[in-house]
Amino acid sequence: MSKGPTFLYDCDTGIDDAITLLYLASLVRAGEAELVGVGTVHGNIDPLTGALNTLRVLEAAGMTEGVPVAVGAPRPMAQDVHYALDWHGTDGLGDTHLPDPAGRPVAESAPAQIVRLAREMPGELTLLATGPLTNLGAALLLDGELPSLVREVVVMGGAFDHPGNITTHAEANIWHDPEAADLVFAADWPVVLVPLDATHPTAVHDDWLDRLGAHDGEVAQFAARILKFYEVAYTPTLKRRGAVIHDALAAMLAVDPGLGEYVHRPVRVELRGELTRGTTVWDARSLPAEDVRRPVKVAVGSDVAAFQERLLTAVVSL
């Protein structure tokens, strides 16, 4: 019996998703969490490539069986598909062009996997989503009872008092499918949202990256290799060597909520604005809430030093 969360991980396996998979693998190995499946979605890369990347990472971490990897939505609900090749490379893993994994994705689609596992494990699943939310939106449309079956939804996405990272106001995961994101925030289930406001301050820099690179373990070297591309991509934004491993913070807060600081507010997604489509919106006024939506638990900060140390320890432990 797992002492920690039972994760179903929905992602678009690029570089920070890969590091997050390693973090989750370390928890599984330590008996502190269970990973019952992974679904991939368009975003950093196409979902089939993302699924193969997921299998590569799981195999690198020694998790060669027991975690089905399902391919999900290849495009958003209502706009063209875009990939983040300039941030994650043409292969999604920093142009490392690693060998094909030994395993293959399962035949079941990622939205169907969400519904099936939620039905099989009612009240147990922590649905961790660190890519566009198309699979979650589709799963909500497939099964209207889904919100009552999932223990918690933890999403890396959005920006409030922080600039967007794909437009002036919109964060990438939300911008890639605003309609699906709004479905997720409108549903009556407990949502924890980890936006750029919380993730950007966790950027790792020289000391962290050098400590990772100096470790002679195969998994640590694998992580350091794929992070090289990310470091170069982030230099203009951070103005120094470094990277923001956004997705790992969402995973860590799912395991240890006490690591974060939060506010509770209904969240909506701008769907029509010419300049603001994909923006996450909350009402920050000190007035009685008029929004009928269930409030979202929004992370606005975290213990950065603890996050960085735990993440490094997890990756080098494999």
Image (cartoon, rainbow, N blue to C red):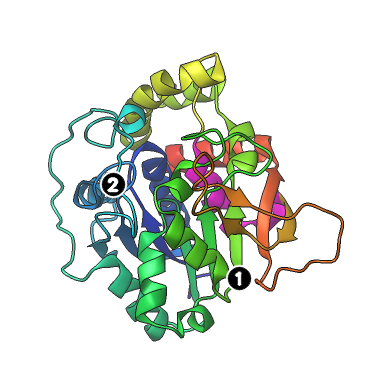
Query: According to the image, label 2 marks what residue?
Result: 81
Give the residue at the far top of this rendering. 240
Q: Amino acid at mark 1?
A: Pro
Quarter that holds the C terminus:
top left
Q: Is residue 53 above or below residue 224?
A: below
The residues colored magenta run 245-260
Q: Residue at x 18, y 60 (%)?
A: 105
In the image, what residue occupies the spot 63% across and 59% down?
Answer: 267
Q: Main secondary structure of the magenta part?
A: helix
Question: As displayed, is residue 314 above or below residue 230?
Answer: below
* Label whose residue precedes the other's in the sequence (1 or 2): 2
> CA–CA distance between discs 1 and 2?
28 Å
- Spot occupied by residue 60 in the image (x, y as percentages of width and height): 27, 44
User: Is residue 183 placed above or below 96 in the rendered structure?
Assistant: below
Q: Is residue 95 left or right of residue 292?
A: left
| Quarter-of-image position of residue 159 | top right
Q: Disc 1 designates what residue?
A: 190
What element does badge 2 sit on? loop
